[in-house]
Image (cartoon, rainbow, N blue to C red):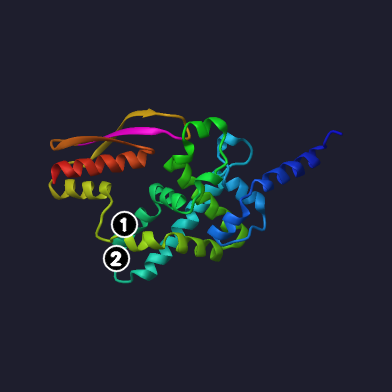
């Protein structure tokens, strides 16, 4: 017997719920899902079809920034705005989120399309970081801000203590060096982009006129720009 539209939606929801790694979510995120489909969506890459993580990632990104900002504001009362901003930028960076994803054993639970899996999306910083943020978004919707905060503070604890307030982000450090030495600001340009949409590789060049240039690649424009800035800093220091 053919399913009606409503029945088909219910069947699809049940299918998605059966894909949920409940034990892993409870043990890792510290929360028993009230709406399992929400967490399945958070783990689902666009290549899989159907609802995917992108909207939840949008929300989770903002929740993460809020929780980290309030955390470091309380944890480092002696630091000024600039120092706190450097900590925040490092702790919410895509690479940091991807490292969190690896540390919590996210990879085997990603729901990827066949081609995306073949292309190595499960190892992509972009994908891992996005899904971590999507899971935070799901936690916020399903359990509230306190539940999301508990997970973030647990998962990011080692990262928080490992970030030095004195360590400037390479792009900021390069910009400050140029200003201090009377040069024009660094200029970044995209040399090339390769790879599939879900796992791109960018090659970025950075130049300070009259000083020098450097080229580096990364899994995102931000990562490649950071690597290029770090390389140019090594040259000029």
Compared with residue 188, is residue 164 higher up or lower down, i.e. above or below?
below
Compared with residue 115, is residue 77 higher up or lower down, i.e. above or below?
below
Cα distance in 3D space between marks 1 and 2? 10 Å
Q: Nearer the viewer, residue 46 or 190?
A: 46
- Position in image of residue 8 (x %, y %): 77, 39
**142 displayed left or right of 196:** right
Asked whether residue 104 is in view, the answer is yes
Q: Please name the residue shown 54% across and 52% down the image.
A: 135
Label disc, if present, on residue 86 of the rendered structure: 1
Q: Please name the residue that numbered disc 2 is placed on.
A: 80
**Helix, strand or loop at mark 2:** loop
Mark 1 Cα-neighbour bin, 10 Å: few <14, some 14–19, many ≥20: some
**193 displayed left or right of 137:** left
**196 displayed left or right of 77:** right
- Magenta span contains residue 205: yes
Q: Main secondary structure of the magenta part?
A: strand
Q: Please name the residue shown 56% across and 32% down the image.
A: 114
Give the magenta range. 199-207
Label disc, if present, on residue 141 of the rendered structure: none
Residue 227 figure quarter: top left
């Amino acid at each position: 017997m053919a399913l009606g539209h409503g029945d088909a939606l219910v069947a699809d929801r049940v299918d998605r719920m059966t894909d949920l790694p409940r034990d892993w979510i409870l043990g890792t995120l510290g929360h028993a899902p009230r709406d399992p489909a929400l967490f399945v969506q958070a783990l689902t890459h666009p290549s899989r079809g159907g609802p995917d993580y992108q909207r939840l990632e949008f929300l989770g990104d903002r929740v993460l920034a809020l929780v980290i900002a309030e955390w470091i504001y309380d944890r480092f009362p002696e630091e000024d705005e600039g120092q706190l901003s450097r900590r925040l930028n490092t702790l919410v960076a895509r690479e940091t989120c991807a490292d969190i994803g690896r540390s919590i054993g996210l990879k085997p639970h990603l729901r990827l399309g066949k081609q995306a899996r073949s292309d190595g999306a499960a190892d992509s910083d972009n994908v891992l970081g996005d899904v971590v943020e999507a899971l935070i978004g799901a936690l916020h919707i399903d359990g509230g801000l306190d539940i999301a905060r508990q997970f973030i503070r647990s998962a990011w604890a080692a990262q928080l203590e490992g970030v030095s307030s004195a360590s400037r982000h390479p792009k900021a450090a390069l910009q400050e060096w140029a200003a201090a030495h009377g040069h024009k600001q660094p200029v970044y340009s995209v040399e090339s982009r390769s790879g599939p949409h879900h796992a791109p590789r960018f090659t970025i060049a950075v130049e300070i006129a009259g000083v020098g240039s450097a080229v580096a690649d990364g899994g995102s424009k931000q990562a490649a720009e950071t690597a290029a800035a770090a390389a140019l800093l090594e040259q000029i220091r």
